Structure formats: C-alpha cells, structure tokens
Amino acid sequence: MCRADRSTLTSGTSKEASSAGSHVFGTIGCATLKPKEGRQQERRHFRDTQLVYRRVMRVVIVGAVILIVIAPGCARPVPERTGGPKDSPHIGWVIMSGDADNSDRDFVCQSNPRSECVVPADRPDARVLSHVHLYYHSASAETKYTGSVQIGFFDGAHEVKPNMTVKPGDSPGNHSVSSFVSSKPGTYFMTIAVVATSVPSRAAQEIREQVPVTVR
C-alpha cells in the first residue's frame, strides 16, 4: 500500500522539506509528482474545470432562450378567421397591454371575436406598455404579405411594414411590436393596409381594416 510522507507535503515548514531543496515534491494519492509534473496536472485540472463550466453555462443559456421564445406562444392563441373563404388570405391581430416588465399582462381585444379596444393612458407614475401581435394566415397558394400597419395609439405613431411569405398549410406568420401607449386620452386607430400577393399567379388582394382603440 502507498502512503504519503507527511514531510513531503509541508514544503518550507519542516527540516526534511527544506533540506531537499529543489527536489521537494508532494504525494497525491499513490502517485509521486515532481514540481513540474504537479504544475502540469494543476493546469490540466484547471482547463478541465473551465470546460465543464462552459458546457454548463451553454445549457443554462440555451434553456433560458428557449423559455423566452416558447412561453409567450402558450398564453396567446392565434385568433380564428373572421369569415370569408378559408383558403383566402387573411390577417388576424391581438392587442395586449401591461407595464415595462410585461407588456402581455392584460388582454385588450382581438380580431375574432371582436370586442371594444380600450387601453389605459400612459402616466409617469403608472407606465403602460402595449404589445400588438399580427398574424398572416396561409391561403390556398403561397402568399406574400406586404404593405403597412399603422398603430396610432402608441406614444408617437408607429408603422409596421410586413414582408412575409406564408405557404399553404403553414402556421400563420407572426409579427409583433410593442411601445408605450399615448399619454393623451382619446380615440386612435390601428390602420391595416396590406397587399396579399399569390406567388404562383401574381394575383394581388388588398386587405384593409381600421380598428378604433380608445385610450383612457
């Protein structure tokens, strides 16, 4: 059986260690290492520890990103179509509101079923952030959506310019934007002026809607 000599493990504190001079070494387990070999093993151990740490951090970061991407979709179902042929181009939307920490905290209204759209006015002591979600539905043919969606109830008018292609049978394409709500009470509009173009035939269809939003 291998035993560690206590004098070799206390370099500089015993006569045996000091008399050995540059030949002092330590015993690790049953392997006897000279100073150079000990330093090499320490470096290898340090590198291995860093490698494990990096791998763990990668898993943690990737898990956090997946959580951020997936979680919103669970709490906000896509609105159904609002009539018309099921294979025709269509745009759905949802308006949410909340604060700076969570702009999706409160449901405001959506394209179907429709209800009155009312959001609180932004105030210095109670900031109000709104999140608008736009959904571009699939049609019987591959469809490209372009045009403009103007959001008038934000603090400073905001314009979204979609440029999205959706294939038949695909889930709706999604585009969302958030900003602070206007601090001035009144009635504003979200104006949809989008062109849906069939990729195979180049036939274009205009989709227009003006949604009143009350800021109180």
Image (cartoon, rainbow, N blue to C red):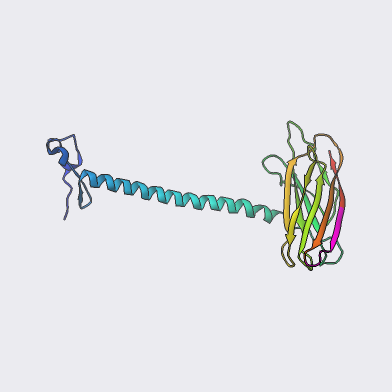
Confirm whether residue 77 shows in the render: no
Residue at image point 49% right, 51% down: 58
Residue 70 lies in the magenta-colored region: no
Q: Can you give x and y, in whole percent of width and height, for residue 196 in the image? A: 81, 59
Q: Can you give x and y, in whole percent of width and height, for residue 84 in the image? A: 87, 64
In this rendering, the answer to whether 84 lies above or below 26 is below
Residue at image point 50% right, 53% down: 59
Is 117 placed left or right of 12 in the picture?
right
Confirm whether residue 88 shows in the render: yes
Q: Can you give x and y, in whole percent of width and height, for residue 138 in the image? A: 76, 63
Q: Quadrant of residue 135?
A: bottom right
The quarter in which the C terminus is drawn is top right
In this rendering, the answer to whether 209 lies above or below 85 is above
Q: What stretch is highlighted in magenta?
A: 200-208
Q: Nearer the viewer, residue 139 or 27?
A: 139
Total marks drawn? 0
Q: Which residue lies furthest to the top in this view?
A: 124
Q: Which of 40 and 105 is in front in this view?
A: 40
Q: Can you give x and y, in whole percent of width and height, for residue 201 in the image? A: 81, 67
Q: Nearer the viewer, residue 206 or 97?
A: 206
Residue 204 lies in the magenta-colored region: yes
Is 131 placed left or right of 214 in the picture?
left
Residue at image point 41% right, 50% down: 51
The quarter in which the N terminus is drawn is bottom left
Q: Nearer the viewer, residue 67 or 1?
A: 67
